[in-house]
Amino acid sequence: MRAILERWTVFVLGVAGWQVATMAADDPFFPTPRVIVGRMYDLWFSGPATRLFLTDGAVGNVLPSLARLGAGFAIGVVAGVALGLAVGRSQWAYDVLDPVLQFFRAIPPPTLVPVFIVLFSLGPQMQIASIAFSVLWPVLLNAADGARTVEPVQLETAAVFRLTTAERLRLVVVPSALPKIFAGLRLSLSLSLILMVFSELQPGAADGIGFQLVEATTRFDYETVWAAIVLLGVLGYLLNMGLLGIERRVLSWQRPA
Amino acid sequence: MARCRALLGILVTVSLVAGCGGSDSGGDDGGGSGLERPTIKVAMLSLPMNAPYYIAVKEKLFEKEGLKVETQPVQQSTQAYPALKNGTIDIVFANNSSMLLGHDKGDLRINLITEGTRLTPGFMGVLVMPDSPIQAAKDLEGKSVTVHVLNNIQAITLNAIVRAAGADPAKLNYRQVVFPQMAAVMEKGDVDAIHVTEPFLTDAKQKLGARVVVDGGGAPVTDLPLDGYFALDGWAKQNPKTAAAFQRAMRKAQEMAADREAVEAVLPTFVRNISPEVASAMTMPAFPVANDAAHVQKLIDLMREQGQLSNPLDAKSIVYEAG
Amino acid sequence: MPGRATVRRLARGAVGVGLVVGVSEALGRAGIVHQDFLPPASTILARAAALAADTDFLADVRATLTAWALGLLIAVGVAVPLGLVLGNIPVVSNAVTTIVEFLRPIPSVALIPLVAMLFGTGLEMKLTVIVYASVWPVLFNTVYGLRDVDPVAKDTLRAFGFGRLAVLWHVAIPATAPFIATGVRMAAAVALILAVTAEMFGGFGDGIGIFIAEAANYPGGTTDTLAATVWAGVLGLLINTALVRGERRAFPWARPR
């Protein structure tokens, strides 16, 4: 309890310090937190109570962004875990794919726009695809690593009990790989947030938090730029906390090896 | 918390220190030519419409006026705005509608030192695939059209053309796609039509057999000023001789650019990889040899009409004239 | 002399690469769009090879790698000491957790417009963006590694009268070193991606990202864009391989994550 209090006290102090510093600096590039929060309220949270206080702007930008984020993340995770577990179980597959995977992981996402724009249709499909593409690699590599490092004792036990492949996967491999998979998931979550912003800078984007951010830049509307940045931080924080919660719950079911 | 502030502080300090050596203060040595700033920095794009500037560089027209010009290539003029604002860049080549929008909002008050290009028939156009049912501007109602930047010059001009043709521009579905990707997107059928400028226009015609349905440079928007060389409001007043020298050099260059061969000769020096077929077939914009506030006013009025500018603006207050 | 196992692994890796090239070639020639818009792999690879002889492009590569190296160095220089402090003083660590959890998810990309407004678009902007994103993996891995330090070893030294700093030096740092190395490897990948991305979005000077952005300005530039992308991916792959090997050699006892 005290820990939580400590944490939030420091946080509040930090924000207060920020407020004082920006008020003193009086620079149009650095609006005060109060102004930023006010802008966030105007843009997204001053709507009717029936709609959870969301404005049209929020429904039209924040929700689509989150929806694409969710879809891209989900697709990337499912594909990554499935492929990763398969690759991890086979040393041969791992050796074949490792250089290729490391290569794709190193490609800066915006450079692939010409490819995505041809392979997928303009708009949400393309955006979700680019998010999923970037989410895929860390999840895949971590799942593969997790599948590779299952303790031999467990595998032998599974053999003794003559578990089928499916049962072995479900009862031995997956639980053993879960910590690594979750590590990959956490990384992918932050990546998907980044990619969500990227994808809204691409051709065919028409809405979204990233879209609003860039659009505000061209209008020199710094307050909206900061509002979008703060919103991204808050969303990232909430999503991370959510994932951590799930991780704790899932991993607590696991018996220690 | 203190750590994070320190972290940010370190970051900022490092960046500032790293940047200390970088800024240019080109105006201090006075020089024999009597110019307030004998060396100026100009942020330039690398598009074919920038040919006159590069002609000026090649023919040393700036030196003849006693001016030394350092070119700073950028991909989009927006990237130079911060530098313009803090003085590291003196002049930026930018598109008029963007600059007018910034000026109107009060964020970036500017002066147009020299006009860059004016719209000619055939320089921009709306293209469709050969088998498309769209034949004229009216058919665009309810269809998707790509533009390079939303709510900018392409939308402004196309709206005017569509309205003149008796259709409702509000019924056009604009999608934002950068020029190089427009043809691919249309080929796939993701959009119905693309609004492109040269050299992408000629390229799409050559590669896809695309058909022009609307001349983006036709009436009523022919001769509209598209872009120019801008400086901050007040820069010209502080550096009158420099501004006049720049204007004189650019005017000579624009005259030379009226000769197509001169332009085609200089294109390869600053545009990477333009194919000769496209270079010889593309339509050139008009390069005006004198600033004309009346033309700029036409653009301003059009933007006011379409609700993009909220304040009235007299072109004469931003178009610079030497002397 | 590489052993048989290494040769076998390289051969399998080559198979993987060959597969991917084959698929890309097929895609490019499938006629979805004109070949200029989605070039087949052979065209891209030929152009990538040709770029190796292009002095302008090599200057771009040098510029990107310089920004990358500088950014990484600064990030490590900031994150490791910070991590050591945070990991050793639980009170401080706990206190800043919330702030860190809000700052970390903010995508560096979203900050580019703001940073560009402040610093223009030269090296300072690139470095700020690179450092901001690269700090987190190093920081977290350092702190994580410190938690893994054997408390018995620490207590033993304390019992012998060694002060806190000495404990740090003799026990904590050697134990944490493998984790820090992993963090640096992850940060290296992030730093390269951001170096190229920052260049693409903030165009002054030289750099692979600037080459890519310029290539987008003329028809038929997709081949150049993708050729430079291949370079970026290969560079990332080489850096990762070199760092993994370095890690294995320096810390043979630790399992690479």
Image: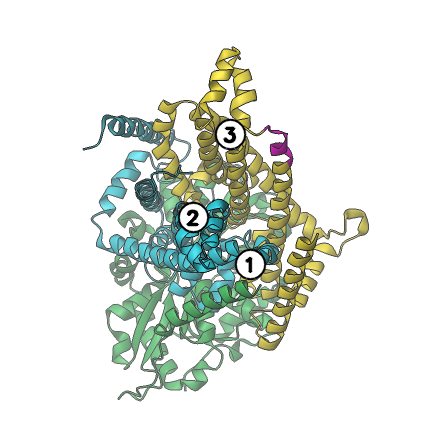
Chain colours: A yellow, B green, C cyan
- Above or below, B297 relative to C204: below
Overall secondary structure of the magenta section:
helix
Label 2: element kind: helix
Query: Is residue A64 toward the left or the right of residue B48 in the image?
Result: right
Question: Which chain's residue wears label 3?
Answer: A
Was residue C244 drawn as part of the magenta stretch in this picture?
Answer: no
Query: Is residue A222 toward the left or the right of residue A134 in the image?
Result: right
Residue that numbered label 2 is attached to: C176
Label 3 Cα neighbours within 10 Å, binned few <14 / some 14-19 / many ≥20: many
**Quadrant assignment, res B55:** bottom left
Label 3: element kind: helix
Label 1 Cα neighbours within 10 Å, binned few <14 / some 14-19 / many ≥20: many
Label 1: element kind: helix
Task: Tell me the mark number nearer the camera, choosing from 1 and 3.
Answer: 3
Residue at the extreme left: C1
Residue that numbered label 1 is attached to: B156
Q: Residue at left 52%, top 63%? A: C114
Location of residue B169 in the rendering, given as x and y in whole percent from the top left corner: 61, 52
Residue stretch rendered in magenta on the structure: A249-255
Residue A102 in sight in this render: yes
Out of A126 and C73, give the one closest to the viewer.
C73
Q: CA distance from mark 1 to mark 3?
A: 57 Å
Task: Tell me the mark number nearer the camera, choosing from 1 and 2.
Answer: 2
Q: Residue at left 40%, top 65%? A: C124
Q: Are marks 2 and 3 on the same chain?
A: no
| Badge 3 amino acid | Ala
